[in-house]
Image: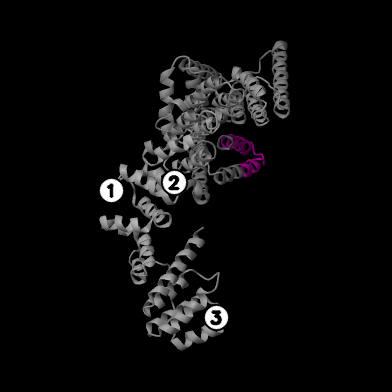
């Protein structure tokens, strides 16, 4: 859109210069393009629009050496900037103009991708890694930009070209482009020079945009760039017609039609056509064959596809699945290793491999799962570990024991393991964990709260009481279990006081009115289902010492199944004010359970 806007400027200026009314059409089209750039939140589009337009206006005005034309061009540019500033909205916000001083180039993910791409280029700077291989090979070189998502390209046309073909190819393309740009000259009057200048600026801006994006690797934008370069060339009127050039272009067009039709038919008919389409079809067909337990077909399809894409990790993984089904474990293990090498970041790959080995090769399953846990991030490890425990518990006791040993030695996994066991198994696992971390130094504050919460629900509370007596500082984490322990010994006052001392603050409604007790009672009788009025009445009754009335008000709502949980808390406070500690404890437990249900 930004490059097209530059060409539209030239078209509009040419019609305006010749006194034609079509410049109004070009002006409306320019407005539509600017709106499209803004609505698309395109920073590059805005930069290309403003920079390319400024360059074209400046060159045209300076070539005419007219102060009036220079002033007119400058005025139009100011008008364009004003429109962008007024209607740029969130697109302008993407430039972070208010935070320029705090931005660091190293914090942008794009620059981390660039850094890793240069590491790949250094490994093969002359001949590159071959066309179409960046996606497969780059994963091995990712360090600064490592993450869960796979990088399909290096965020730059030129780096992509350099990494796949080497620097000689980049140099030849630059030299060839320079020779073509020489064909643009001369830009003299009578050669449609203003329009050709706009097309040349568009082609150059397209190439520069390729430094920070990949428009040259998208068919639509690449053809647009080539078209602009062709429009900018100077064509003398004395060219002689050539029959062989016409025949050559017709032949090229016919080949393009045949190849396009072949790709369309292959994509729709799942034909094994060599190339990207054939590889995608082979993946889909081999996965279907594996689901149908046709393992020989799976291996055959992936073998053909690997001849076209020898660095595709998914093909090696699919072939390994077929080889496991054909009872060829050594070949399958080799292919699984190739898949893991070519995809060194995603934890899902070794996780799925472990699931495959679980029933037949427990040791290999445990090895793959260790690798999956190593790759998984802090937020993914507990979830992945839980899925491993679920699968192993149904298929392999041997792997379950290995997973138990792994989980009880790592603080972020121990909670996932403890949440699945209770009773003696819980006590045993807890004892093993305390052997490695007797002071809970590896656990965070949140993890300590979760550990003691599980302990209070699944294990012996008397043992918990002894531990807390030994480590009094742990009472702030174990208070819920200690409260339950006190309740089992009929010491309900201590149990309730622990909840008030360590329990979380309760979110209560805000009172904005200063109504009297009589007014609140009248409003409550008129609207007995109004929670806000009920809470205000409860507060006023408690402040006046009318505890029995406040208790009745709280129970009026707490006995309803869908009432807010805080009414159970208010009931507990009322019972505590009456020093009925058992009922206060029971009401607080009801509050705790209601809050847990609401959080689900």
The residue that appears at 43% across and 57% down in the rendered structure is: 457
Where is residue 341 drawn, in percent x and y? 47, 24
Earlier-in-chain disc, 3 versus 1: 1
Region rendered in magenta = 5-29
Label 1 element class = loop
Quadrant in the picture for residue 484: bottom left
Is any part of residue 276 visible from this angle?
Answer: yes
**Which quadrant: the N terminus?**
top right
What residue sits right under mark 1 in the picture?
439
Residue 528 image label: 3
Would residue 111 be counted in the magenta stretch? no
Q: Distance between the residues labelled 3 and 1?
A: 53 Å
Residue 416 image label: 2
Characterize the magenta stretch by its predominant secondary structure. Answer: helix
Label 2 element class = helix
The residue that appears at 47% across and 38% down in the rendered structure is: 400
Colour mode?
one colour
Earlier-in-chain disc, 3 versus 2: 2
Label 3 element class = loop
Where is residue 208 drawn, in percent x and y? 49, 29
Residue 437, relative to residue 227: is it above or below? Answer: below
Where is residue 464 drawn, in percent x and y? 34, 56
Mark 3 vs 1: CB contact within 8 A: no
Mark 1 vs 2: CB contact within 8 A: no
Would residue 19 be counted in the magenta stretch? yes
């Amino acid at each position: 859109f930004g490059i097209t806007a530059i060409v539209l400027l030239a078209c509009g200026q040419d019609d305006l210069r010749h006194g034609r009314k079509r410049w109004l059409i070009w002006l409306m089209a320019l407005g539509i393009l600017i709106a499209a750039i803004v609505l698309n939140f395109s920073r590059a589009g805005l930069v290309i629009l403003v920079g390319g337009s400024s360059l074209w206006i400046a060159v045209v005005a300076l070539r005419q050496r007219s102060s009036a034309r220079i002033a007119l061009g400058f005025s139009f540019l100011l008008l364009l900037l004003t429109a962008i500033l007024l209607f740029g909205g969130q697109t302008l916000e993407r430039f972070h103009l208010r935070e320029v001083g705090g931005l660091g180039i190293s914090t942008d993910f794009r620059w981390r991708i660039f850094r890793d791409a240069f590491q790949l280029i250094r490994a093969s700077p002359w001949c590159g890694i071959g066309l179409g291989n960046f996606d497969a090979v780059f994963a091995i070189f990712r360090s600064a930009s490592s993450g869960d998502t796979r990088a399909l390209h290096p965020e730059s046309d030129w780096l992509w070209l350099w990494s796949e073909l080497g620097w000689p190819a980049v140099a030849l393309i630059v030299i060839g482009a320079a020779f073509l740009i020489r064909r643009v000259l001369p830009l003299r009057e009578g050669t449609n020079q203003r329009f050709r200048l706009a097309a040349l600026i568009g082609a150059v801006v397209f190439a520069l945009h390729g430094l920070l994006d990949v428009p040259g690797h998208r068919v639509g934008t690449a053809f647009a760039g080539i078209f602009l370069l062709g429009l900018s060339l100077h064509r003398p009127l004395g060219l002689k017609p050539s029959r062989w050039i016409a025949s050559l272009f017709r032949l090229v067009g016919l080949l393009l039609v045949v190849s396009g039709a072949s790709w369309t038919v292959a994509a729709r008919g799942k034909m094994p056509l060599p190339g990207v389409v054939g590889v995608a079809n082979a993946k889909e067909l081999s996965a279907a064959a594996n689901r149908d337990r046709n393992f020989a077909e799976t291996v055959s399809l992936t073998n053909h596809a690997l001849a076209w894409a020898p660095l595709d990790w998914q093909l090696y993984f699919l072939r390994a699945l077929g080889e496991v089904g054909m009872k060829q474990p050594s070949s399958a293990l080799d292919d699984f290793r190739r898949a893991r090498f070519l995809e060194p970041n995603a934890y899902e790959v070794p996780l799925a491999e472990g699931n495959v080995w679980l029933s037949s090769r427990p040791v290999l399953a445990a090895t793959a799962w260790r690798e999956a846990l190593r790759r998984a991030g802090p937020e993914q490890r507990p979830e992945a570990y839980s899925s491993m425990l679920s699968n192993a518990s149904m298929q392999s006791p041997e792997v379950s024991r290995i997973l138990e040993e792994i989980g009880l030695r790592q603080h972020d996994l121990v909670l996932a393991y403890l949440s699945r066991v209770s009773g003696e198994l819980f006590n045993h696992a807890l004892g093993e964990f305390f052997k490695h971390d007797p002071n809970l130094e590896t656990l965070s504050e949140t993890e300590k709260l979760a550990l003691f919460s599980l302990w209070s629900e699944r294990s012996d509370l008397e043992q918990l009481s002894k531990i807390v007596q030994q480590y009094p500082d742990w009472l702030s984490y174990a208070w819920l279990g200690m409260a339950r322990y006190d309740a089992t010994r009929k010491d309900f006052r201590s149990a309730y006081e622990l909840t008030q001392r360590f329990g979380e603050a309760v979110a209560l409604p805000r009172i904005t009115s200063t109504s009297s007790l009589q007014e609140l009672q009248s409003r409550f009788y008129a609207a007995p289902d109004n929670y806000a009025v009920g809470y205000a009445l409860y507060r006023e009754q408690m402040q006046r010492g009318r505890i029995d009335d406040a208790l009745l008000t709280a129970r009026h709502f707490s006995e309803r199944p869908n009432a807010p949980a805080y009414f159970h808390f208010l009931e507990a406070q009322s019972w505590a004010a009456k020093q009925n500690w058992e009922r206060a404890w029971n009401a607080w437990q009801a509050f705790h359970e209601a809050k847990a249900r609401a959080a689900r």
